[in-house]
Image (cartoon, helix red, strand yellow):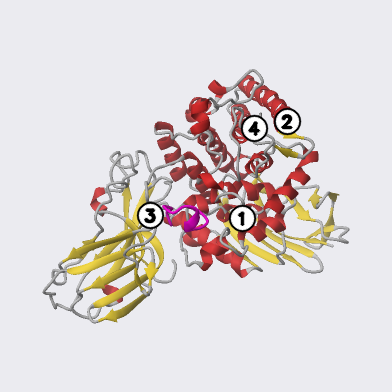
């Protein structure tokens, strides 16, 4: 447990049908404050260290002095001039309630209900808990005596399977470590609803939010229940953007790769076919968009001004990139289900669409993809999504990756997930890491330096004035750093075979661990004159090893013994998979 957190009072509750149907188990955890400051007689500022969704328990305890007037309790996500900000910007939370302590009896102090996120269609919390709100700070005004830490507790709601130290990340860059810690905690804190929701403003599940959160959740907890509960909810309550529907295929594919569970996949396979946008596909295999969907459907990025001047046409490059990626995933899922004919059909659809995608949307003169048929504008988004989805022919990838790296973070925190994936996968790891910690207001460094304890919905308040300060889709480094810097990814469903391929960037060392369905996987690497990798794989897992080829290196050793390895491009690849605990050195 983190310092200041209590494990003595944990209340497990399974959300029922009145809340998130079939949702995962969440529980209330009582947390002690990390600091209490007396602002004035009878006025105390309480700091719980980080924002969490919850309410309070409050008691006079042995101090039986009953106040003459009600006590005012203020909940806040933000401070202003050393006090709880009572008029915070946008959707940043503030709430106030008056209570009358009753001797030594413990009171549950909850904020007033917000009509927008405590009634359907919002995902509801169990009624016995009382209203939950995100807050870090509490002001208690009118308290008749001193307020001590044992008299106030935050009752915070979290997924009950989450273990704080199941995943770790440390590196030679202290700011990068702070970014990971912010993003990793953001995933834990936003599990309060038992399904992945978009934030506190609406408390609704959205497909893109859910997929990005799922990736980061699996980097911290291998239990699939909350991801599956979110998937089930979204099958019943889909949302409107064109690209959000294919995210459901992405979620199912991610579940299969994480768990290897074809029984769950089989129960949901037919429903996935409805997420392919097939009803909008023309003879050339490309998805078309009628005027109403161009106006309200094709989203590209959000908020709208994060679209890098994207020009919307009837054949939208980003929408088609999502459709193509979904077709490829569906072909693999069909194969996993033993549906060979359907696997071939999906694969053939993808080949037809891919040929048209390259012929009609790629501009050979620019070496870039246009935003759509009928425009010469080439935005960041028309190129980052094809690159991240593996749709770009091999010969064109370096140029597009370099171009994206030069453009910088010209998209939203949502698009950043895919932007950075494309950079990591195409030898631009130094740029990807630099973008995470870049100065200015379009990086996670900005969130850290602004005092955020949960990631925001947008890069800054000025980019989305109504933004939430508790949005998990902004937590991409929680999955990107384990996947690409530690270099850990499943190669076969259920992690029977993994890929270990560290991307170094400008780092000199990194280490960490992550949970998998087979147990803990740990990686530690260091770069000086040589490159050394220490690896512990859980039982039942083997790993393909690819090491970054340092200048002058000529061989690879495992446990001191030279092994067969071949060099291809920027990597040394070991001929044989490894298992157990090993130390690998490149010389």
CA gap, disc 1 to disc 2?
A: 32 Å
Dot 2, how many residues are within 10 Å of its Cα: few (below 14), some (14-19), or many (20+)? some
> Relative to 561, is 165 on the left or the right?
left
Q: Which residue is mark 3?
A: 91
Q: Could you tell me residue 561's position as x and y percent?
A: 83, 60
Mark 1 or mark 2: which comes first in sequence?
A: 2
Quarter location, residue 509: bottom right
Q: Nearer the viewer, mark 3 or mark 1?
A: 3
Which circle, 1 or 4, is nearer the viewer? 4
Q: Is residue 205 magenta?
A: no
Q: Nearer the viewer, mark 3 or mark 4?
A: 4
> Which of 271 and 538 lies nearest the eye of the viewer?
271
Q: For numbered disc 4, what is the local secondary structure?
A: loop
Residue bearing the label numbered 4 = 372
**Residue 376: percent from left, percent from top:** 69, 35
Range of residues picked out in magenta:
458-469
Q: Main secondary structure of the magenta part?
A: loop
Q: Secondary structure at mark 1?
A: helix
295 relative to 529 in the view: left or right: left
**Residue 471 versus residue 275 in the image, above or below:** below
Mark 3 touching mark 4, by CB under 8 A?
no
Q: Which residue is mark 1?
A: 482
Q: Earlier in the sequence, mark 2 or mark 3?
A: 3
Split into 4 quadrants, where in the image is the C terminus? bottom right
Indicate left or right for 449 with 229 as reference. right
Q: Nearer the viewer, residue 511 or 543?
A: 511
Given the current orientation, which residue lies at the most extreme left position? 68
Q: Which residue is mark 2?
A: 358
Q: Are marks 2 and 3 in contact (CB under 8 Å)?
A: no
| Residue 463 within the magenta-colored segment of the rendering | yes
Report how far apart the C-alphas of labels 3 and 1 lie in the structure: 31 Å
């Amino acid at each position: 447990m983190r310092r200041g957190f209590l494990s003595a009072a944990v209340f497990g509750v399974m959300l029922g049908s009145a809340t998130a149907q079939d949702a995962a188990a969440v529980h209330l955890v009582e947390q002690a404050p990390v600091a209490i400051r007396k602002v004035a007689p009878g006025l105390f500022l309480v700091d719980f260290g980080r924002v969490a969704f919850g309410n309070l328990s409050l008691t006079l305890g042995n101090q039986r002095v009953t106040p003459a007037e009600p006590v005012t309790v203020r909940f806040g996500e933000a401070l202003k001039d050393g006090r709880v900000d009572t008029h915070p910007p946008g959707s940043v939370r503030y709430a106030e309630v008056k209570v009358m302590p009753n001797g030594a009896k413990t009171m549950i102090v909850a904020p007033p209900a917000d009509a927008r996120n405590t009634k359907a269609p919002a995902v509801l919390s169990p009624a016995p808990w009382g209203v939950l709100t995100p807050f870090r700070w509490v002001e208690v005004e009118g308290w008749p005596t001193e307020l001590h830490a044992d008299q106030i507790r935050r009752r915070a709601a979290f997924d009950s399977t989450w273990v704080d130290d199941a995943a770790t990340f440390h590196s030679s860059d202290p700011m990068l470590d702070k970014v990971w810690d912010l993003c990793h905690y953001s995933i834990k804190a936003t599990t309060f609803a038992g399904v992945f929701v978009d934030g506190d403003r609406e408390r609704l599940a959205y497909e893109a939010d859910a997929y990005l959160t799922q990736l980061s959740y699996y980097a911290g907890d291998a239990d699939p229940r909350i991801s599956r509960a979110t998937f089930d909810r979204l099958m019943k309550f889909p949302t409107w953007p064109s690209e959000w529907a294919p995210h459901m295929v992405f979620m199912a594919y991610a579940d299969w790769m994480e768990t290897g569970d074809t029984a769950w996949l089989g129960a949901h396979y037919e429903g996935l076919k409805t997420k392919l946008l097939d009803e909008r596909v023309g003879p050339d295999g490309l998805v078309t968009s009628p005027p109403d969907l161009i106006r309200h459907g094709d989203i590209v990025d959000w908020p709208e001004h994060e679209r890098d001047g994207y020009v919307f046409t009837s054949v939208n490059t980003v929408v088609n990139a999502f459709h193509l990626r979904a077709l490829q995933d569906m072909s693999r899922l069909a194969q996993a289900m033993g549906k060979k004919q359907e696997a071939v059909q999906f694969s053939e659809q993808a080949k037809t669409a891919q040929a048209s995608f390259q012929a009609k949307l790629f501009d050979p003169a620019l070496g870039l993809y246009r935003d759509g048929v009928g425009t010469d504008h080439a935005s960041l988004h028309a190129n980052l999504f094809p690159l991240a989805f593996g749709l770009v022919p091999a010969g064109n990838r370096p140029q597009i990756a370099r171009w994206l790296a030069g453009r910088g973070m010209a998209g939203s925190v949502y698009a950043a997930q895919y932007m950075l994936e494309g950079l990591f996968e195409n030898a631009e790891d130094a740029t990807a890491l630099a973008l995470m910690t870049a100065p200015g207001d379009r990086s996670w460094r900005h969130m850290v330096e602004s005092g955020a304890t949960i990631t925001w919905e947008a890069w800054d308040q000025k980019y989305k004035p109504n933004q939430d300060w508790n949005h998990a889709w902004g937590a991409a480094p929680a999955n990107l750093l384990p996947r690409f810097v530690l270099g850990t990814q499943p190669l076969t469903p259920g992690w029977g075979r993994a890929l270990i391929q560290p991307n170094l960037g400008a780092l000199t060392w990194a280490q960490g661990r992550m949970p998998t369905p087979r147990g803990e996987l740990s990686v530690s690497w260091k770069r000086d004159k040589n490159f050394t990798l220490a690896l512990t794989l859980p039982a039942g897992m083997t790993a393909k090893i690819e090491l970054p080829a340092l200048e002058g290196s000529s061989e690879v050793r495992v446990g001191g013994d030279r092994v067969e390895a071949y060099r291809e491009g920027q990597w040394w690849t070991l001929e044989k998979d490894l298992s157990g605990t090993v130390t690998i050195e490149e010389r």
